Image (tube, grey):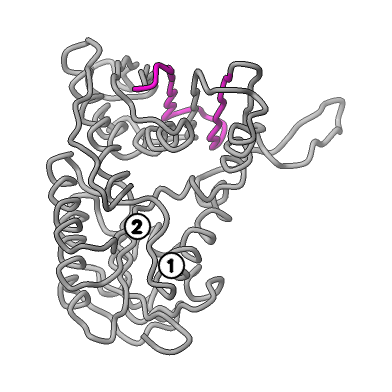
Amino acid sequence: MGEDSVGVGIIGAGAIGRVHAENLAKRTIGARVAAVMDVDTERAEAVAAASGAGRVYADAMALIGDPEIDAVLIASPDATHAEFTLACIGAGKPVLCEKPLATTAADAERVLRAEVAAGRRLLQVGFMREYDPAHKDVLAVLDSGAIGKALRFRGAHINPRYGDDLTVEDAIVNSIIHDIHSARFMMGAEISGAHVSWVAANPRDPQSCRLADVHLKFENGAIGALEYNGDSGYGYEVLVEITGETGVACTLPNSSPSVRNAAGASQAITPSWPQRFQRAYVDEVQDWIRSIMANEATGPSAWDGYMSLVVADACVRSTETGLPVEIPRIERPALYA
């Protein structure tokens, strides 16, 4: 690591990889993109050229092993996350891994135990909603005591169009997992039970998913409800609401100006996730780089990545049985106290 910057290697040059590369190169103090890896080398070369990276790899393990790479950002397909994160921990390199940490709770537990065995936190999981100003504002109201103890969490995750080929398991592990983590970190309690119901996107495929509701129980007695809409037809929204003993705090529907014209009133809605969470993605990587330079890990941890997948696995089991599922978990390691 140079005196003034952390050399980051990015694994995955798809949509989210490009977002991170641009933010690291243009909007992050103390960071530089040192290398980009993708199995599509032309795509990797394009991202490397745009972000000023000096090297391109077709092999993720070669990038992780490069002594010139100080830290690694994993934005490759979900099925590769656990393997690449384990390699980073083995190499002693800080890593920001996009969600989900793995595709199963068992693989996430392998990562968790590897980091515990290493004796220090090296991993941050890409639950960027912790950095979203709207989420932070609602959490600040709760923490202030203005609405009393939290009794209920409600989250809505609304997409303009996701496609008929998305299964309910895909929706849970790749999209609803964000809402699962939001519920955990904002309520300050682990989830103890889940029940899922959904509407098929394709009547001929009952496992396809257009709309899903997840009902939650928390260990402290609170309850929760998550709504996933994969085909709203109008735009992208993420909303949260916390009901407390003496009041309610919720995010505003959107931040765009209200426009009155042509005998009507309207507000624009963000078309997709990069626009909605632009600020959160910038603040997320800045906090990650700052934590590396301070040698003090912050942000969503391996425990958060593991527990979100424990809940997601329970949600998948609920879709298989049609029944509520109780959520067992291991004891939280002291490293994540």
| Residue of label 2 | 124
Q: Is residue 28 left or right of residue 171?
A: right
| Residue of label 1 | 291
Report the Cα–Cα distance between label 2 and label 1: 10 Å
**Residue at position x 51%, y 52% in the image:** 274
Where residue 20 appears, as percent x and y from the top left, is 43, 64
Residue interval drawn in magenta: 219-244
* Residue found at the very far top of the displayed protein: 323
Which amino acid, by three-letter code, is at mark 1? Answer: Ser
**Residue at position x 58%, y 55% in the image:** 279
Quadrant of the image occupied by residue 219: top left
Please tell me the numbered disc located at residue 75: none
Q: Is residue 337 above or below residue 24?
A: above
Q: Residues within 10 Å of mark 2 (few under 14, many from 20)?
A: many
Q: Is residue 300 above or below residue 214?
A: below
Q: Residues within 10 Å of mark 1 (few under 14, many from 20)?
A: some
Where residue 37 appears, as percent x and y from the top left, is 26, 72
Q: Earlier in the sequence, mark 2 or mark 1?
A: 2
Tag 2, which secondary structure? strand
Magenta region includes residue 253: no
Quadrant of the image occupied by residue 80: bottom left
Which amino acid, by three-letter code, is at mark 2? Answer: Gln
Tag 1, which secondary structure? helix
Q: Is residue 302 above or below residue 255?
A: below
